[in-house]
Image: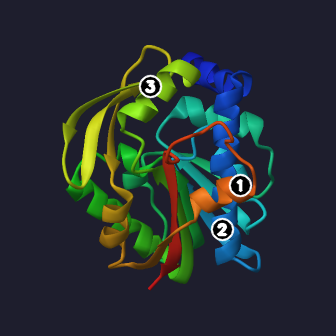
């Protein structure tokens, strides 16, 4: 990833109304899931694949001390420039190499991380590590692509309204593999079915899916969307 590409992406999200509305809706559902988990402010939170810091900012009302982790030095630099929250630290490293004592965090959150975990072995390792870093009874909230994300209907909407392209190469019961692009550079991804993820994660967590559709309808978000929302928020507690 280069600074140029991701600066373009930041501007793209701000200037294309449909894109901004989409991410506002994602952030709203993410916050509501966190609110349901945390009636009181916690001590520590971890944001996995924090990118340029938008998802890290969502955690500010929920934890006194926050760590954002991402493998891109460019994105970490942007996050530091944009987020001056005094109690947030950023670490440039892949999550697989991130080091912290077990049970260090009250909350672990992430947006669009698991779709970059490309094998079942990496998925098991990642979820096991999340469980080890999280305190017993601690909360998780993960934004993931929804069931409709890889459908032809969503691909058509993405190309027409978002200038976002997708190409899917391998479809399996538990996931769909392919690439996506918004600027001509293709990024490999694996979209795990949310129901599969919930079953997979239930070994470690009491896991639920936020009522995304209900929230979008009752709060009047994404009013022009006429199909299944292409994202889910999976949330719950460490067993």
The mark closer to the camera, 3 or 2, is 3
Which element type, helix, strand or loop, lies under badge 2?
A: helix
Q: Is residue 204 above or below residue 97?
A: below
Cα distance in 3D space between marks 3 and 2:
32 Å
Cβ–Cβ below 8 Å for labels 1 and 2?
yes
Cα distance in 3D space between marks 3 and 1:
30 Å
* Lower position in the chain sequence, tag 3 or tag 2: 2
Q: Mark 1 = which residue?
A: 58
Q: Mark 2 = which residue?
A: 34
Q: Position of residue 232 (x, y in %)?
A: 50, 56
Q: Residue 86 carries which label?
A: none
Q: In this view, does 169 lie above or below 71?
A: above
* Lower position in the chain sequence, tag 3 or tag 1: 1
Circle 2 crowding by C-alpha within 10 Å: few under 14, some 14–19, many from 20: many
Which element type, helix, strand or loop, lies under badge 3?
A: helix
Q: Which mark is residue 156?
A: 3
- The answer to whether residue 115 is left or right of residue 11 is left
Q: Position of residue 80 (x, y in %)?
A: 70, 39
* Lower position in the chain sequence, tag 1 or tag 2: 2
Residue located 69% across and 64% down the image: 32
């Amino acid at each position: 990833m280069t600074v140029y590409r991701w600066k373009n992406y930041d501007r793209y999200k701000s200037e294309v109304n449909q894109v901004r509305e989409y991410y506002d809706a994602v952030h709203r559902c993410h916050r509501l899931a966190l609110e349901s988990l945390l009636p009181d402010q916690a001590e520590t939170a971890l944001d996995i694949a924090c990118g340029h810091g938008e998802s890290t900012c969502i955690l500010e009302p929920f934890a006194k001390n926050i760590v954002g982790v991402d493998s891109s030095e460019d994105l970490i630099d942007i996050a530091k420039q944009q987020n001056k929250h005094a109690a947030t630290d950023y670490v440039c490293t892949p999550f697989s190499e991130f080091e912290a004592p077990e049970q260090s965090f009250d909350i672990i959150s992430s947006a669009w991380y698991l779709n970059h975990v490309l094998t079942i072995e990496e998925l098991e390792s990642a979820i096991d590590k999340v469980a080890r870093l999280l305190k017993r009874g601690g909360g998780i909230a993960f934004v993931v692509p929804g069931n409709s994300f890889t459908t032809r209907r969503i691909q058509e909407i993405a190309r027409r309204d978002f200038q976002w392209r997708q190409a899917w190469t391998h479809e399996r019961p538990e996931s769909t593999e392919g690439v996506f692009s918004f600027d001509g550079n293709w990024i490999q991804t694996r979209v795990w079915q949310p129901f599969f993820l919930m079953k997979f994660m239930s070994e470690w967590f009491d896991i639920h899916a936020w009522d995304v559709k209900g929230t979008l309808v009752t709060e009047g978000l994404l009013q022009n969307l006429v199909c299944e929302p292409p994202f889910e928020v999976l949330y719950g507690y460490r067993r």
